């Protein structure tokens, strides 16, 4: 498929927007007061995030390959699957989509934010945080989770039109993200996506969310830098080690 920056931008906006709307939406439903799904638990959150990825890939996949994630975009660029001059368009679409998704979650659950006293739970709707705050290990957790994501995407190859999560197909990539969440997400909340974490965190800081606290900027670099490093490492290991070892 011929690269069209406008179409790619819009595909990433809609795909990432839906991803964040449904992903942050399930966190809001589980954590905020007086929601019908309050206290539904981790299985519900990880499952809904997997479905959110499924929806984003279905929407954006045929047009942009469905990166939906700056770590995926950068990893694919390092690998050579995505030209570097396409990267800014993907990143712009991903962050704009994340902003829109987070705003819609804020509107949808506005009354429930009002009813919730815990400021930490309100922030958790928008961004990740570790249960045990150990910044070096938190960073490593994000690197490992994102490494798995990008390495498997590369192992599946491209879908014939544009490299991205759609290379796996919507259902397989949803299962991959579900597996990462269940197995590796318990430490930091598995951001594994800078746009998914930083975009909504900025919205949390900007919007007058009822009774909100601070946006925890001291931690905010971890779910940005960790996934980017994980994506780059996956691309390097896949290209320099896996391909050579397998004789591919």
Image: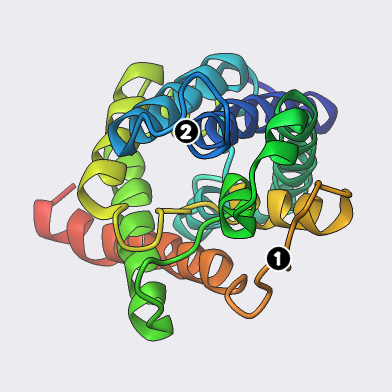
Task: Estimate the x, y position of residue 169 in percent, counting from the top left.
Answer: 38, 20
Q: Earlier in the sequence, mark 2 or mark 1?
A: 2
Describe the colour scheme in one phrase.
rainbow
Name the side, left or right, on which 100 lies relative to 182.
right
Task: Estimate the x, y position of residue 17 in percent, counting from the top left.
Answer: 69, 30
**Could you tell me which secondary element the residue under label 1 belongs to?**
loop
Of residues 219 and 108, the one drawn nearer to the viewer in this rendering: 108
- At horizontal 50% and vertical 19% (from top left) the residue drawn is 36
Q: CA distance from mark 2 to mark 1?
A: 20 Å
**Could you tell me which secondary element the residue under label 2 belongs to?**
helix
Which numbered circle lies on residue 244? none
The quarter of the rendered structure image containing the N terminus is: top right
Task: Estimate the x, y position of residue 144 in percent, counting from the top left.
Answer: 30, 63
Q: Tag count in the figure?
A: 2
Query: Please, is residue 177 above or below residue 148 in the view?
Result: above
In the rendered image, which residue does mark 2 sit on?
30
Of residues 119 and 161, the one drawn nearer to the viewer in this rendering: 119
Q: Quadrant of residue 19?
A: top right
Residue 83 appears in the rendering: no
Of residues 194 and 124, the one drawn nearer to the viewer in this rendering: 124
Residue at the far left: name it. 246
In the rendered image, which residue does mark 1 sit on?
215
Q: Quadrant of residue 42?
A: top left
- At horizontal 12% and vertical 52% (from top left) the residue drawn is 247
- At horizontal 31% and vertical 62% (from top left) the residue drawn is 187
Task: Estimate the x, y position of residue 62 in percent, counting from the top left.
Answer: 58, 16
- At horizontal 33% and vertical 35% (from top left) the residue drawn is 41
- Disc number lying in front (2 or 1): 2
Neighbour tally class for label 2: few under 14, some 14-19, many 20 plus, Cα within 10 Å: many
Residue 155 appears in the rendering: yes
């Amino acid at each position: 498929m011929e690269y069209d920056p406008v179409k790619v931008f819009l595909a990433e906006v809609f795909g990432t927007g839906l991803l964040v709307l449904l992903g942050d939406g399930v966190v809001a439903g589980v954590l905020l007061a007086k929601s019908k799904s309050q206290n539904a638990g981790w299985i519900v959150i990880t499952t809904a995030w997997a479905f959110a990825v499924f929806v984003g890939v279905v929407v954006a996949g045929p047009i942009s390959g469905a990166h939906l994630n700056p770590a995926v975009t950068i990893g694919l660029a390092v690998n050579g699957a995505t030209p570097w001059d396409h990267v800014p368009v993907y990143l712009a679409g991903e962050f704009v989509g994340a902003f829109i998704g987070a705003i819609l979650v804020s509107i949808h659950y506005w009354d429930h934010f009002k009813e919730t006293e815990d400021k930490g739970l309100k922030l958790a709707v928008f961004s990740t945080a570790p249960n045990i705050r150990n910044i070096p290990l938190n960073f490593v957790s994000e690197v490992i989770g994102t490494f798995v994501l990008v390495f498997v995407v590369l192992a599946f190859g491209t879908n014939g039109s544009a490299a991205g999560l759609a290379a796996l197909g919507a259902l397989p990539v949803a299962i991959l993200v579900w597996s990462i969440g269940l197995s590796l997400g318990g430490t930091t909340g598995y951001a594994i996506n800078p746009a998914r974490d930083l975009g909504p965190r900025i919205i949390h800081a900007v919007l007058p969310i009822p009774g909100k606290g601070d946006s925890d900027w001291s931690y905010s670099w971890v779910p940005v830098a960790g996934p980017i490093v994980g994506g780059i490492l996956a691309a390097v290991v896949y290209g320099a080690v896996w391909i050579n070892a397998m004789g591919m």
